[in-house]
Amino acid sequence: MKLSISHHTRYEYDREVQLLPHLLYVRPRENPLLQVNHFGFTFQPAAQVHWMRDDFDNLPASVNFTANSALLEVRSECAVTTTDTAPFDFLVRDYATTFPFAYEPLHRFNLSIYLAPPEVAAQAALRRWLEEHFTHRPRETVPWLLAFNQCLSRSLSYRRRDEPGIQTALATIALGSGSCRDFAALLVECARLQGIAARFVSGYMFDAADNGASAGAMHAWVEVFLPGAGWIGLDPTHGLFCHNAYVPVAHAVVAESVNPIQGAFYSAVPATARLTTDVRVRRLE
C-alpha cells in the first residue's frame, strides 16, 4: 500500500521570539516492511537541518532556526510503501507459546530496559485493575496478548486530548479514559508488570474510512517482544494487532522522549503561543 503523509504544525506567538534548537520526530522509520519513497521539510522561518540517530536508532532531525520570528511553521511531506503482511504472520519459539513464559538469559539482558516494572506505588493499583478487567486470560501467548490488548480497548473510553504530556497509568485507569498516547503508556506499564518487554511507539495510521479527508493527529501504540517473532505491534486504542496501515516514526522506553516536536523559545518578556496541527494520511493506490 502506498501512502502520502502530510504533517503541518504551526505555533503563533504574541510577539517575536528567539527560537532555540528543536528536535523533530516525524520521519518514518524504514524497515523490511516499510519503505520511505520521499521525505521533505519546509520551515517558517528558514532553518538548517541535521539528521542524527538517537540512542534507539530513531532518525530525528536536529533543527536550528536562522531568525527570530512571531511564527513557527513546520511542514513535512512524505510518501511511503507498506507491505501487506497479515498481522499474525509470525512464529513464536516453543518455550514462549504459552503464557506466562520467561525470556532466555540473553534476551532478558538485552531487553532489561523494556522490562523495568512500574513504580512500586503504582503496581498494586495496576494489578487490582487488571484482576477486575482482564478476566478472560487464554493459555496460549498470542491469544493472551490479543485478549490483553482488547481488554484495554473495551475498558477505557477514547478521548482526544490537546493538552501536552501523557497521563500516568494510574490517572488513566482512575478516569477510565484517555488519548491514544495514554492508552499506549498504560499498556506498556501493564505489560512490563506481567513480565512482557514493551516499548512506546509514535507514528501515523491510515484510516480507510477517512482517507485523509479531515485533519488528524499522530497516533501512538505499543510493541511487545515475542521470542522468535521479535517486536510485534499492539494498538490498545482500537484493540488490534498492528498491520500495514501503521507507519512507525520512533520508539522508546519513555513515551515523552519521542514527542514529535521538541524545543523551546526565548523571550525577554512573557510570551504566549497558540498551537495548531494538521495531519493527513491518504492512500495513493
Image (cartoon, rainbow, N blue to C red):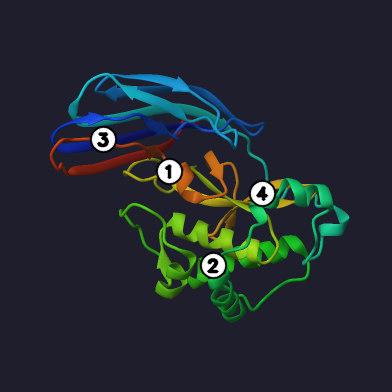
Q: Residue drawn 48% across and 21% down? A: 38
- Circle 1 packing at 10 Å, graded few (<14), some (14-19), many (20+), is some
Q: CA distance from mark 3 to mark 1?
A: 17 Å
Q: Residue drawn 42% across and 44% down? A: 218
Residue type for callout 2: Leu
Residue type for callout 1: Asn
Residue 239 x %, y %: 55, 61
Q: Earlier in the sequence, mark 2 or mark 3?
A: 2
Q: Which residue is mark 4?
A: 232
Q: Residue drawn 31% across and 43% down? A: 215
Q: CA distance from mark 4 to mark 3?
A: 38 Å
Q: Which residue is mark 1?
A: 259
Residue type for callout 3: Phe
User: Disc 2 on helix, strand or loop?
Assistant: helix
Extreme residue in the front direction: 268
Extreme residue in the right direction: 94
Residue 6 visible (yes or no): yes
User: Disc 4 on helix, strand or loop?
Assistant: strand
Between label 4 and label 1, give the one nearer the viewer.
1
Residue 41 x %, y %: 37, 23
Q: Which residue is mark 2?
A: 152
Q: Which residue is mark 3?
A: 265
| Contact flag, marks 4 and 2 (Cβ < 8 Å) | no
- The picture quadrant where one finds residue 198 is bottom right
Q: Is residue 235 above or below residue 274?
A: below
Residue 24 x %, y %: 41, 33
Q: Earlier in the sequence, mark 3 or mark 1?
A: 1
| Contact flag, marks 4 and 1 (Cβ < 8 Å) | no
Q: Is residue 43 above or below residue 159?
A: above
